[in-house]
Structure formats: C-alpha cells, structure tokens
Amino acid sequence: MPTHMPKAISPAQPAPLRSGADTAPDPGRAGNDDLLNAVGTVISVPQARELYCEGSSADAWFQVRSGALRTCKLLLDGRRQIDAFLLPNDFFGFERLPEHGSSAEAIMPTTVVRYSRARTEKLADEDSRIGRQLLDITLKQLNAAQDRILLLGRKTAEEKLATFLLEMLVRSSGGDAVDLPMSRIDIADYLGLTIETVSRTLSAFRREGIIRLPTPQTVVVPDRFVLERLAGAS
Amino acid sequence: MPTHMPKAISPAQPAPLRSGADTAPDPGRAGNDDLLNAVGTVISVPQARELYCEGSSADAWFQVRSGALRTCKLLLDGRRQIDAFLLPNDFFGFERLPEHGSSAEAIMPTTVVRYSRARTEKLADEDSRIGRQLLDITLKQLNAAQDRILLLGRKTAEEKLATFLLEMLVRSSGGDAVDLPMSRIDIADYLGLTIETVSRTLSAFRREGIIRLPTPQTVVVPDRFVLERLAGAS
DNA sequence: CGTTTAATTGACCAGTATCAACAGGAGTGG
DNA sequence: CCACTCCTGTTGATACTGGTCAATTAAACG
C-alpha cells in the first residue's frame, strides 16, 4: 500500500470519472467509470501541503474530490507561475514524461482521488474507451492552456482580471457570486501580474460598480456582460 | 476527394507518424504507422496561405512534411498571439471541440499530411496503440504549452529571446546555427513582445557576442551555455 | 486585546510599448 | 544599369503600463 492514506470506505466512492461542465460530444463513454474507480484511492491533502513536486516521479494522476489545488512551476530566483487552479472534478497530474512537470499544492483542505498510472495505462490498452477519455481530458487541458497563452501574451491587466473572474464564475456556476479560494498572490502568479496590480485592478472594478467585494474572497458580479466586454474575447 | 490538392504520388509517401526528437519512453508503438498513413493525404500550402482558420470545422488534423507554419489566435482589436511554430514532423490541428481553436498559416511554401478526424477516431477505437499515440502527441503539446505559460507569465524579454533561440536550436538540430523561418513580427507575437523589443534584444545579444547574425534570419550561437544561463530555466 | 498575516493604497520607477526615422535588400520598370 | 518603391528590420526618443518599495488598513487567530 504505497499511499499514506487509507482506502476510501465503502460508501465514499470516488467521484465519477468525467469532466465537470462538459458540453462537448461524449462518444461511447458510459460504463467504464467503475473500471477506473476500482483503481482509485482517496487521499486527503491539508491546506498548503504539497501533493507532489516538480520533478518527482509521475507514477499516479488525480482527480479533485473536494477543496482546491494549484499546479505551479518555479524559476531559479523564485518567480512562480501557476499553471492551473484545480476545483472539484478536475483531473491533473497526468504526464507524458516519467516526472511531474509542475508541483501541486492544496490551497485549502482538499481530498483527491489517486489513480495509478501503470494500472491506468494497462486499462487503456485493454479498453479503447478509457484511452479516448484520457485523450479528451488532455485535449481539454490543452485548450485551456492555449487560452492562457493568449491571455498572458497579449491581454492587459484589466483584461486578465476580467477573464479570470469570468472563468471562476463559470466554474463555480453559482449565480452571480464567486468565492475565490485562492489568495491575491496566487491570482497574481496565475495571471502573470503582481499582487498589487491584482488588488488595484479589483478595486478599480469595485469603484466602477463592475463587481462588489463583500469580503476580499467573495466577488459579486451584477452584470457579467460588462466583464465579458472588458475581457476582450477573441 | 474533398481536399484541393491531388493525392501523393506513389514514392512520396507521408512522413512516418511519430514525434521528432523524442526521448521519452515509447511503449508498444511499432507497427501502426502504416495504418494511419493509409488515411493521410499530402497537401501543399503556399507561403502566407491559411490552411484553416479559427472556428472552422476541425474535421482533420495534420503533420508537417516540409516547410513551416504558425498557429495563432486573435483578439477583437487585432492583437495576435502565436500558439506554436510547426516544423517538419510536428503534428497540429487535433482538437477536442468540433471547431479549430486557432488558425494555421504557412510561413513558407509548405506541405502537410492531412488525416481525417473521423477515420482516425475509428482507428483509435479499434486499435488502442493509435489512441496511445494520439495521447502521447497531445501530452507533448500540453507540456510545451505549459512551458510557454511560464515564459509568457514570468520571464523578461531577454529570457524570452534566449529561451526561444535555444528552442529553435534544439528543434533545427543543426550544430550551432539556426535559420529562423519566421519574421520578427512572428517572433514577437510568439513571445508576447513587440517587434522592436525583439530586434533590440537580439542586437544586444549580438553586441555582447552571445550570438552572431550573418543575416537577420540566421543566428549563430557560439556557446549555447551562455544562452541557457540567460534563459533562466526552472 | 495583541500579534500576525493578507489585502489595500500610495509614491515612484523600470521595462517594455509606442511613435517615428532610417537603413538595407528585393523587385520592378525605365 | 540605375532609380524607385516596397518591405523588413534596426535604432532612437518618449510614453505608459505595470512593477517595486513602503506605509496603512483589515482580517484572522490566539
């Protein structure tokens, strides 16, 4: 038993293996959830604890069950870039190389389901639907990464924050209010900005009535169309 | 015959379906090249011609046979971000959604091999090795995208250019000289800079003896270790 | 309460963008 | 062969977005 947490007790079965708000075509995917879930193990990750670090052996991948994580890369002098925020049902840690390309840390008390890489690859060999699903997950992440490349390369601070708030609004899918689980520093390192610019830009949005900030972690968006115009979509 | 160019004549068979400089483990991949090549069609793309545009139907994907292309996204006001430069043997255009997420344009006279998406997906269903290979290609692109996210979010202009030159050096794999097929504008839109900053930074490298520029398109790197230090790897 | 940490705000600065001029080739036509 | 134009790239002067440094406020926690 290589994991440092016990297996899930019977009723607490892992979340179903499918993407979150998924509107894409879904070819022949039913019926294989149980296959993969059979190899999943539930793991708890305390806040601020690293689940794995950049360069460590990528012998497993994960799905968020509850809580939230960030994946990030570091430069030699400590500059940090956050690749992604991971919310419930998100997959992460699936790699091409034998080592993880970024580290994963919980930004609040979190539970994840761990899938053995070797067992997954064996399953994918036997059942092409599993492979199809892994490909779908990876392509989704690639699409998201390409959108971030546009954002980081060509958008202004204002556009970055507007895009970010819209993304969180969609992902949390809870009306017009978002609870931001991450700190301002995390937002800054996600958008390629500094904490001060994040704070200033959000304050400007608040002054202009585009958002309300009942607490620093809670953002209310009365009219998301205004944000969409500021986000300057393609 | 939906394509606008004739099929390859017999001796000009499509390039083998495998990644370029690939050092990763290569599990059970031999023997399926012919399967996919049977559905490949060779297409010529003149310089500056668009192969497909953002939002068009993604009913096929491609491999570069000769020449070079760029994939890019646009913002409403015309700001452009280049996702990737595609050189011989590179794959591109494989999508999760029914539409292409970016456009692809030849930056010199180019030939590509076109693969039908529907046929590919059928093949992948029948033979898990095909699916494994598509996943491998996609994961490789995801890794590259994540490196670009770090570059765009956290690196300085100097570090961006150093990283770019090293990347081109590795990809062209021809000693210490690189022939840049793309213009300064393309480099700028790839690195999230302006053409002037690209030019200035390259001139600074030249003045410091880090590179030589026999022509604006040819870069000679006497000592790539110097560039590696400037690139500020993780 | 006092202490610590996160977030906000302000003053100033630097890196890169913007605007503009200039140089070097590649065609083109006289 | 030589202007002439066009296009790409280089260089310079200046502006501005966002970064840095610093102080203040607010929130969290014992």
Image (cartoon, coloured by chain):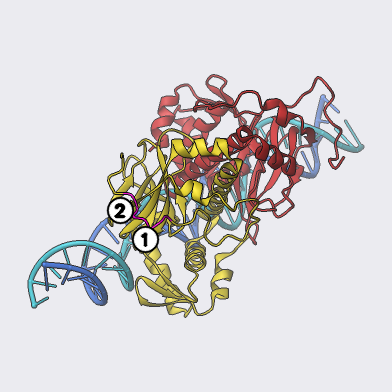
Chain colours: A yellow, B red, C cyan, D blue
Q: Position of residue A226 (x, y in %)?
A: 56, 75
Chain for numbered disc 1: A
Q: Position of residue A67 (x, y in %)?
A: 36, 61
Chain for numbered disc 2: A
**Residue for point 65% across, 53% down:** B97
Q: Which residues are magenta?
A: A7-14
Q: Secondary structure at mark 1?
A: loop
Residue B13 relative to residue A216: left or right? right
Please tell me how crowded label 1 is: few (under 14), some (14-19), or many (20+) other residues with Cα within 10 Å. Answer: many
Q: Quadrant of the C terminus of chain B?
A: top left
* Residue placed most toward the observer, A95 or C5: A95
Q: Secondary structure at mark 2?
A: strand
Q: Amino acid at mark 1?
A: Gly
Q: Is residue B3 magenta?
A: no
B194 in relation to B234, above or below: below
| Residue with the mark numbered 2 | A45
Q: Are marks 1 and 2 in contact (CB under 8 Å)?
A: yes
Residue A156 relative to residue A206: left or right? right
